[in-house]
Image (tube, rainbow, N blue to C red):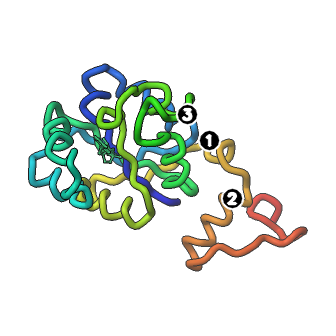
Amino acid sequence: MERTFILLKPDCVIRGLIGEILSKFEKKGLKVVGMKMVKLKRKQLEDFYSHHKEKPFFEKLIKFMKKTPVVTIILEGLNSVEVVRKMCGTTTGREAIPATVRGDYSMSTRMNIIHAADSVDMAKKEIDMFFKQREIYDYKKPQMSFIYCEEELEGEIKKRKFGKPRKIHKGEPTLSTA
Ligand code: CMP
């Protein structure tokens, strides 16, 4: 299963929205496989936001991100990077579509509640920045078969075993019919 990285920012923490936001992702069917609260140091933030270093808002962004501890979370699920980015909405809260996290909870560009990795590679990089391997948990959720249909789960099992997902042909025995 694909993993993605999210970070709940100081505005989310201060406004008491941690549980509410996390619950949206859990209700969607994404699995929390890593989570911790951290107070980020300037150096960590400079690395995390290195691609924004030249932007005029950089210093204020760093100052804002140092205001309180933040919550770092790893979510797991099929196409989780794309799913989570869509759920977050566009950067500026007041422009984000309602029912997205930012659309429902933010009016600002900087104070936009959440950061979410924008690609699979970036998710890997950000997970490595904040989590040690032993802080990421592999556990089973019995309700998986009510979150994904069997072809979706089988695709994942085969990908784990053989590397690449294979199309399941009509009539081919599946885990539940074999
Ligand atoms: P995030 O997804 O964490 O990525 C970079 C962050 O910089 C972004 O969310 C906002 O919090 C902030 N940001 C991006 N653009 C601006 C801007 N124009 N003015 C102020 N802050 C910004």
Residue farthest to the front? 56
In-image side of 132 versus 177 (left or right): left
103 or 38, nearer to the observer: 103
Q: Residues within 10 Å of mark 1 (few under 14, many from 20)?
A: few
Earlier along the polypeptide chain: callout 2 or callout 1? 1
Q: Alpha-carbon distance for marks 2 and 1?
A: 14 Å
Residue placed under numbered mark 2 in the picture: 152
- Asked if residue 128 is positioned above or below residue 8 in the image, the reply reads below
Looking at the rendered structure, which numbered label has been put on residue 97? 3
- The secondary structure type at the circle numbered 2 is helix
Rendered residue at 43%/44% (across/down):
32
Specify which label sits upstream in the sequence, 1 or 3.
3
Say what secondary structure mark 3 lies in: loop
Residue at 56 percent across and 28 percent down: it is 98
| Up/down of 123 relative to 99, above or below | below
Respond yes or no on whether mark 1 lies under 8 Å from ligand 1: no
Residue 72 rendering spot, x and y as whole percentages: 29, 43
Q: Quadrant of ligand 1?
A: top left
The residue closer to the viewer here, 148 or 69, is: 69
Report which residue position mark 1 lands on.
143
Q: CA distance from mark 1 to mark 3?
A: 30 Å
Q: Is residue 48 visible?
A: no
Nearer-N-terminus badge (2/3): 3
Query: What residue sits 62% from the left and 41% below the top?
Result: 143
Does the closest atom of ligand 1 sit within 8 Å of the Cβ of label 3?
no
Contact, CB < 8 Å: mark 1 with mark 3?
A: no
- Report the amino acid beneath label 3: Ile
Which is in the foreground here, disc 2 or disc 3? 3
Q: Residue furthest left?
A: 42
Q: Which residue corresponds to the image point at 35% horizontal and 28% vertical from the top-left? A: 18
